[in-house]
Image: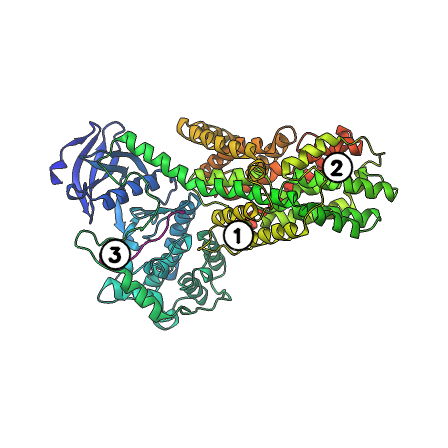
Amino acid sequence: MDNLIGKRLDGRYSIESLVGVGGMANVYRGTDLKTGNQIAVKVLKDEFLDNEELVRRFKNESKAISILSHPNIVKVYDVSVTDKLQYIVMEYVDGITLKEYLKQRGGALTWKETVHFATQILSALQHAHSKGIIHRDVKPQNIMLLADGSIKMMDFGIARFSRAQSQTVSDKAIGSVHYISPEQAKGERTDARTDIYSVGVMLYEMLSGRLPFDGDGAVSIAIMQISEKPKPLAEIAPQTPAGLRQITEKAMEKDPDKRYQSAQEMLAAIEEFKRNPSIQFAYEYRSAEDNPERNINRVVSNTKPSPKSTSIHTGDARRVGTSNPGRSKSAQKKKKKASKGFSLLPIFFGMAVAFVIGAAMFKTGLAEAIGVAVVKKAGTNQVPLMAAIMLVTIVLSSVSSNTGTVACLMPVIIGICQAANISPSKELMPLAIAANVGGTITMIGTPPNVIVTGALSAAGLPTFGFFEFAYIGIPLSIIIVLYTLFIGRHFVPDKQAGAMDEEAVKAAAEEAGASGDGAPKSKTKMWISGIILLGVVACMALGLKTLPLHTAAVTGAILCVVTGCLKEKEAYAGIDWVTIFLFAGMLSVASAMEKTGAGKMIADTVVNMMGENPNPYVLTAVLFLISNVLTQFMSNTASAALLAPIGISIAQSIGADPKPVLMALGIAASMAFATPMATPPNTLVLGPGGFSFNDYAKVGVPMCLISLVASVIIIPIFWPF
């Protein structure tokens, strides 16, 4: 590739000298003739242009670093991919690698130097992880050190996006095997904690002047990473403060669950150590709990070097770019779109069949029977009855239609209130409130939860789990119930019962799956539908790898039809197609906003309005308010679909994790308490409760504000920025 020296690439980049030679690419120093800036140009070697795996890695690197913008990550200016030449144009970093610096020092660094480098490395990783990118090859050779002491992280060649699958080790990985995590060595799924382990190894090396594990070959070192415990830093680097030793050892835990769970968490521990170097943490370093012999066999059996390619590979991992460089650009685009569509199919399936299982609860009469039993058991005292109504409504709404729940329970509640001489309005408003907040507990409880999950998936980012919403949904439900029972109920008007729109109630119940024929219900089918629901929920809660969420839901839906709980047409009718199609439409909107730059433009405008370095808490609160105001006057599904892509763009523009922002948007869209048209449950109780628009505002506005404060406090606890 030396014939490139003195040449111009695409008429713009002048190649001046060769500055680095790697296994798969050469790095040249050059000049951008358009800007006059010095640049580094990484060019894939000619002999690898036909190697699909190496081409994929090269494209993966360009894809990864092109979406990153951080002072400690090398910047990418341009990417060119053709059949004859593939290169990445990056900023030229005038410095040496951290590995070279360690060799020049000839031993351990001071703990202050170590902390100085570690802080910058973790800051860079925190940014990459927030974009859904796992580096997977963090090592001193990939850290450039500048004269001013700052660092630049580079070489994202085997980075992957968080939803990719697994990888194995081979002899070609010897340059990295000293730093890989046990799960990488075992060929298991990796996540952000994989990079944390590698940082721990680097800390160990900087503090002690030696690697924790070394051997004759990649496999032997990988086995050590899995099963052996390194010599304690207290023995080989006794000058290291205890707190810093503990941080290093916690990062190097064999079990990912015992490490720091994020770069941000580890960074916080280091900052605490910097404030008080004499601090000691309550960490206890443990060796691997797995059976070493089993793990050794696993690594050896998975390690079969091939004469064609002995590099780290990613089994069925999601490809970034095309796996065939000979394909046309149009074919590559079609493949990319198709792969994105298939990656979203599990969400579509899981969402649709979950509606079917909820419909079975109403069709068999199980939902109504549970609601009636609980409400009647509460007696005729106003406050206990209100508590029982809200509790059962929250539970039913979390796994089924909130509209159907209200439609089934409303006639029973009105009857009990009339018999006990209680104003129905006092119980119907809490019924609607509970139906709205109960849906926030699970992914399918309310359409906004589905929408924000789909938005993350469409953007290639880590998504929410089925019950992950419960971390905010349950606390919010408790807060809203307590507020209603002790304060909010005093704002609910005491009015005579108005006329109930029986046709509307019947239609809502039937839409949810309930039968309106008045025929007696089979207790056997009630039990069957209940067992199916519990089984599906248990599978989702356990997160079984052998039975994914969508598979469990499909199995449950099929059982509902096979056992006669639902007919095929009733199962089809039970699906909320409006939500499904809005979800699908949102993906197109999100894609259009990304390609046209509209999302970035809106995000930049909002961020600029907030001033320099906007506080993510304040920004999240503002977005919560926007979503919450919109949902009072339009469909909560539409509100979430409109704001989700914008929320992702805004979060990424300030270097924050999009998950807490989207969680706030989704929750805000469900807190639709302040108007009668905000959600169907609010509309259904309007006539029977004799409510006016002002009645909803008096009760709902304080609840919306309480939800805002609670969400801004709770959400960052479980989903840090």
Residue 180 seen in the current view: yes
> Tag 3's secondary structure?
helix
Q: Are marks 2 and 3 in contact (CB under 8 Å)?
A: no
Identify residue type, mark 1: Met
Foreground label between 3 and 1: 1
Instruction: Give the residue drawn at x 56%, y 40%.
Output: 571
Q: Is residue 324 above or below residue 235?
A: above
Q: Is residue 492 magenta?
A: no
Residues drawn in magenta:
162-174
Mark 3 vs 1: CB contact within 8 A: no
Q: Position of residue 558 (x, y in %)?
A: 52, 46
Secondary element type, mark 2:
helix
Report the predominant secondary structure element of the magenta stretch. Answer: loop
The span from disc 2 to disc 3 (Cα, nearest Å) is 63 Å
The residue tagged 3 is 173
Q: CA distance from mark 2 to mark 1?
A: 35 Å
Instruction: Report the residue marked by disc 2.
Output: 699
The three-letter amino acid code for the residue at tag 2 is: Val
Which residue of the protein is positioned furthest toward the bottom in this rendering?
235
Q: Residues within 10 Å of mark 3 (few under 14, many from 20)?
A: many
Towards the viewer: 721 or 221: 221
Relative to 246, 24 lies left or right: left
Q: Earlier in the sequence, mark 3 or mark 1?
A: 3
